Image (cartoon, rainbow, N blue to C red):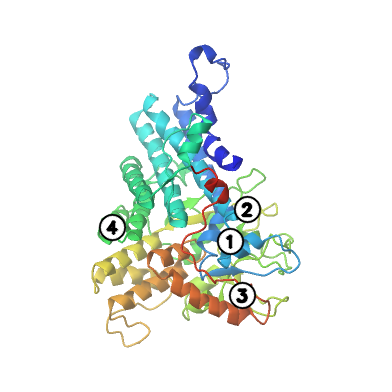
């Protein structure tokens, strides 16, 4: 229970002490406190930087397990020698309980970030900042608040809607009450729309790479509308991203994941990591490598060979989804045959980089890429009516970059011939699966298109057929394909 109280009060403590009567305020005037901190541009820049920080832990710690491994794209390598990773196995197989530590971590990271954004948004009006500076700071905070709420509502449905700074423990209890998902979406849309009006298309300094832009807010809002089946509202946003001229496809798909080319022309928003023992690094390469991989050529260090490894392993369903000649396959995964089980267990290549220290690299994580915008727009246009030339154009631009032939109506090749709206939907779903593999889109795509239950039932059969001779999949695995994760127990205890 204390965990959830601290969730809302971590940053609110500053506010709580600052709201006391002046004659009780005995804080030293030569140190930073709630009364003198949120005043200057530098202080607000420091605060907004702090609002990005929880995203690093969210993406290394839980998002990939809940956004990718939950889907048919990835699974895990069973480790009979170290059984400390069972909470992740449960997520993959829909067996998690309401006290699952990965789910609780996801909830906590998102609300920690929301709390930091609330402080910034609530303190900005009283600060005497240049209007352009205030807009840029406020726009980022609004984007991040909307982004976190969008992730939360898709994962849990009804959740607390917290827009203020709690001033007491009683406030924290009151704020823990759930609001309907529809109310959450209303706030997400309002925040994203406001962010669009405030954020720049680009920042003037390269030091600002990684910050939310107008294009990031437009892309996110378009995805929100698509989730609500409001394709007509998503289309102008996606066209605006394209017409801005701020982005372009990399010629080589693999460049999107080259650590030396991060924040490139295709990047709309990505989570930033810095190599080194500073708490700002990423560990994807170590986490996503099979635990029985014994060479050092991938990570540059000895693999732990325990429950720290073997997660987010590409499934045979995904491997089979790549067409012959698709250049994205070799850029996305590495073939590997497990000595332990004698079956193919490929692993993710996208986030590979060798750091000076084990488990601490500077590999960023892409959230929105320009190719995603093309595919989103293609999907929206098809939902408005089959046969749009632009729908085919944007789909084929992504395919052709991957070295594949275009799809069209009346194509002599039956594999490339698309003649109905439903066939086009299937083409988009396939393209998104392989284009955005391991980037935490697949589960949410299955949810918003209504395909999650059917796809995951078929995936369950495929997993049992492929793995059963090597290891016994839990008998309860996939028995209840839940579309929402169980609401965290410690948060439920606060409801009243």
Image depth: mark 3 or mark 1 in front: 1
- Judge from the rendering whether residue 473 lies leftward or rightward of residue 239; answer left or right: right
- Judge from the rendering whether residue 345 lies leftward or rightward of residue 58; answer left or right: right
Q: Check residue 292 in the rendering and tell me which mark sits there, or answer none.
A: none
**Residue in view at x 46 percent, y 63 percent:** 483
Quarter of the image where one finds residue 96:
bottom right
Q: Secondary structure at mark 4?
A: helix
Q: Are marks 3 and 1 in contact (CB under 8 Å)?
A: no
Residue 270, image x and y in percent? 48, 52
Considering depth in this image, is 174 or 320 the residue closer to the camera? 174
Quick check: can you spot residue 261? yes
**Residue in view at x 67 percent, y 70 percent:** 78
- Distance, label 4 to label 2, CA atoms, is 35 Å
Q: Residues within 10 Å of mark 3 (few under 14, many from 20)?
A: some
Quick check: 365 above or below 20? below
Image depth: mark 2 or mark 1 in front: 1
- Distance, label 2 to label 3, CA atoms, is 22 Å
- Distance, label 1 to label 4, CA atoms, is 40 Å
Considering depth in this image, is 144 or 452 the residue closer to the camera? 452
Q: Which residue is tagged 3? A: 335
Q: Residues within 10 Å of mark 4 (few under 14, many from 20)?
A: some
**Of the image marks 2 and 3, the number of the one nearer the N terminus:** 3
Q: Secondary structure at mark 3?
A: loop
Q: Which residue is tagged 4? A: 239
Q: Check residue 361 in the rendering and tell me which mark sits there, or answer none.
A: 2
**Residue in view at x 43 percent, y 54 percent:** 157
Q: Secondary structure at mark 2?
A: loop
**Of the image marks 4 and 2, the number of the one nearer the N terminus:** 4
- Judge from the rendering whether residue 6 lies leftward or rightward of residue 416; answer left or right: right
């Amino acid at each position: 229970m204390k965990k959830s109280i601290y969730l809302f009060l971590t940053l609110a403590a500053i506010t709580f002490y600052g709201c006391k009567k002046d004659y009780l305020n005995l804080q030293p005037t030569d140190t930073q406190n709630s009364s003198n901190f949120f005043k200057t541009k530098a202080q607000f820049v420091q605060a907004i930087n702090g609002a990005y920080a929880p995203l690093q832990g969210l993406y290394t710690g839980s998002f990939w397990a809940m956004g990718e491994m939950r889907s048919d794209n990835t699974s895990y390598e069973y480790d009979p020698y170290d059984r400390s990773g069972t909470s992740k196995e449960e997520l993959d197989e829909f067996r998690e309980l309401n006290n699952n530590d990965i789910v609780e971590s996801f909830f906590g990271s998102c609300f920690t970030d929301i709390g930091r954004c609330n402080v910034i948004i609530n303190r900005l009006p009283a600060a005497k900042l240049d209007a352009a500076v205030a807009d840029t700071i406020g726009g980022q905070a609004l984007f991040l608040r909307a982004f976190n709420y969008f992730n939360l509502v898709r994962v849990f449905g009804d959740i607390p809607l917290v827009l203020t700074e709690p001033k007491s423990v009683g406030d924290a209890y009151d704020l823990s009450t759930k609001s309907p998902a529809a109310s959450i979406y209303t706030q997400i849309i309002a925040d994203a729309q406001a962010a669009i009006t405030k954020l720049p298309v680009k920042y003037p300094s390269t030091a600002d790479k990684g910050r939310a832009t107008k294009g990031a807010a437009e892309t996110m809002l378009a995805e929100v509308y698509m989730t609500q089946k409001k394709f007509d509202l998503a289309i102008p946003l996606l066209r605006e991203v394209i017409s801005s001229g701020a982005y372009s496809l990399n010629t080589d798909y693999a460049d999107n994941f080259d650590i030396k080319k991060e924040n490139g022309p295709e990047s709309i928003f990505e989570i930033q990591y810095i190599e080194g023992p500073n708490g700002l690094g990423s560990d994807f390469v170590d986490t996503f490598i099979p635990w029985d991989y014994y060479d050092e050529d991938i990570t540059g260090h000895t693999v732990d060979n325990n429950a720290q490894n073997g997660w987010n392993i590409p499934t045979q369903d995904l491997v089979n989804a790549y067409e012959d000649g698709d250049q994205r396959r070799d850029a996305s995964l590495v073939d590997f045959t497990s000595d332990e089980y004698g079956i193919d267990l490929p692993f993710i290549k996208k986030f590979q980089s060798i750091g000076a220290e084990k488990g601490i690299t500077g590999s960023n994580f892409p959230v929105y890429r320009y190719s995603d915008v093309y595919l989103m727009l293609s999907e929206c246009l098809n939902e408005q009516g089959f046969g749009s030339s632009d729908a085919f154009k944007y789909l084929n631009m992504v395919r052709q970059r991957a070295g594949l032939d275009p799809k069209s109506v009346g194509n002599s090749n039956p594999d490339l011939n698309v003649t109905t709206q439903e066939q086009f939907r299937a083409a988009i779903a396939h393209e998104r699966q392989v284009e955005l593999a391991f980037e935490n889109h697949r589960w949410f795509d299955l949810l918003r298109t209504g395909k999650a239950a059917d796809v995951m039932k078929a995936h369950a059969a495929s997993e049992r057929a492929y793995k059963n001779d090597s290891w016994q999949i839990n008998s309860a695995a996939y028995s209840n394909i839940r579309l929402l994760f169980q609401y965290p127990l410690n948060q439920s205890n606060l409801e009243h």
